[in-house]
Amino acid sequence: MVAGTERTLGDFRQYLPDLSIPRFTTMKEQDAHEYADAFKTNKQPPWVHALYMHWLKLYSDSFKGVTSDGKVEPGLYQLQDDEIPIDKIVATANTLLGLLSDDQKKKMLYHVDSPEWRTWSNPEFLLSDKGIRLDELSAEVRDAALAVVQSTLSPEGYEKALSTMRINGFLGDLVKSPRVMNEFSYNLVFFGTPSADRPWGWSFYGHHLCLNVFFYKRQLILSPWFTGAEPNLIDEGKYSGTRILYREEELGLRLMQSLSDDLKAKAQVYKEMKDPAMPPGRWNRDDQRHLCGAYRDNRIVPYEGVLASAFDASQKELLYDILEQYLLFLPEKARKLRIEHIRKYESETYFSWIGGYDDSSPFYYRIQSPVILTEFDHHSGVFLTNEQPGKFHVHTLLRTPNGGDYGYALRPLIPPIEGAEGTEIVW
């Protein structure tokens, strides 16, 4: 463990909010739907509502994908066999559908090409109510919904997802608002009909956990995803000791500290977390230093920092150790193939840093290449009251640039279905 980490993990207790203020007394009385409706109607807080309206504007644009210069680089992705257990995944999905009412099924099933796939978001506000919400289901149906997630992810990835959900429940208890934030305050929605040989997928989203999965046969694309925690440690109760995102923190800091002074200077694009040298828009109250969060499907993110080709062997090993953590949700074979694909673009892979790099300073870092973009950021408080970024509030995300998110880059490669008269039918 990095020196000073144990001290910073417990620091969140000094930033517990005053629950007597209107924000929390009102939130305590509302369920998730009332909370979202009040937000949209009353437009409070104004800065969050302004961000939501900006998201809707971004959503109106057709999907293009994250790029470094506004131009999608073609030919980066191909159909392949990830050896995922697609028959088992389809079976669990159909078991869930068999337990749903007709009205629930209508909410659950969207077309595989539906733009609604892009309406996930990580705040606690239920801004897009699609599919089924786990905290509104019977235990049987909820378990069946979670079985879909479990059958898709690696065992360690599923445990990470559960830990994120449990920490969300812990935060809901801390602020006495479990009807809005709890262990099961997440939506699951299907895009397309579950199938072992035709494309489909699912989205699972809520506060601090958003997963988007596209399937075609035994291949999957798990992108974009978002994982966060405030705080990132449960220090009491049923799940005491649960902790996430510390490996990403430790490995990132270790890599930065291992660099020569010259490479540190190249990697560190801003010295302060909210640096006066940042251009307008480089920091905002919601995403803070993140560039590719919710609704940022078409963001232009220029390369910056230091090229991985400048790293020595041990530093490259650290880089791929970090990426292993970011790909933890993927089943083993899919993760291995993804790493192999990323390695092909090592000479075009950049590592960039914001903030200090001593043991106690909060920081942001990004790994970016033509085929992957990951971000790590220490945030200031949203429910906790720390005005400066704290190591106990972490946001992480992954994008697949150049049209790779939601499996879009693969879709033109999938053969169409032949109709009875030999005409092509769009799948």
Image (spheres, rainbow, N blue to C red):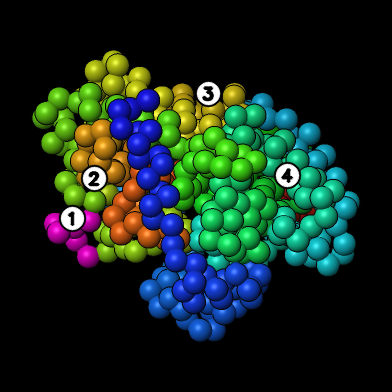
Disc 3 marks a residue whose amino acid type is Lys
Q: What residue did someone put label 1 on?
A: 275
Disc 1 marks a residue whose amino acid type is Asp
Disc 2 marks a residue whose amino acid type is Ile
Where disc 4 sits, the SS reads: helix
x then y, percent, for residue 279: 19, 61
The residue depicted at 37 percent of the width and 45 percent of the height is 11
Q: Is residue 316 visible?
A: yes
Disc 4 marks a residue whose amino acid type is Leu
Say which quarter of the image contains residue 124: bottom right
x then y, percent, for residue 232: 47, 43
In the picture, the disc for residue 336 is: 3
In the picture, the disc for residue 146 is: 4
Q: CA distance from mark 1 to mark 3?
A: 38 Å
Q: CA distance from mark 3 to mark 4?
A: 25 Å
Say which quarter of the image contains residue 250: top left
Decide which of tag 3 and tag 4 comes sooner along the chain.
4
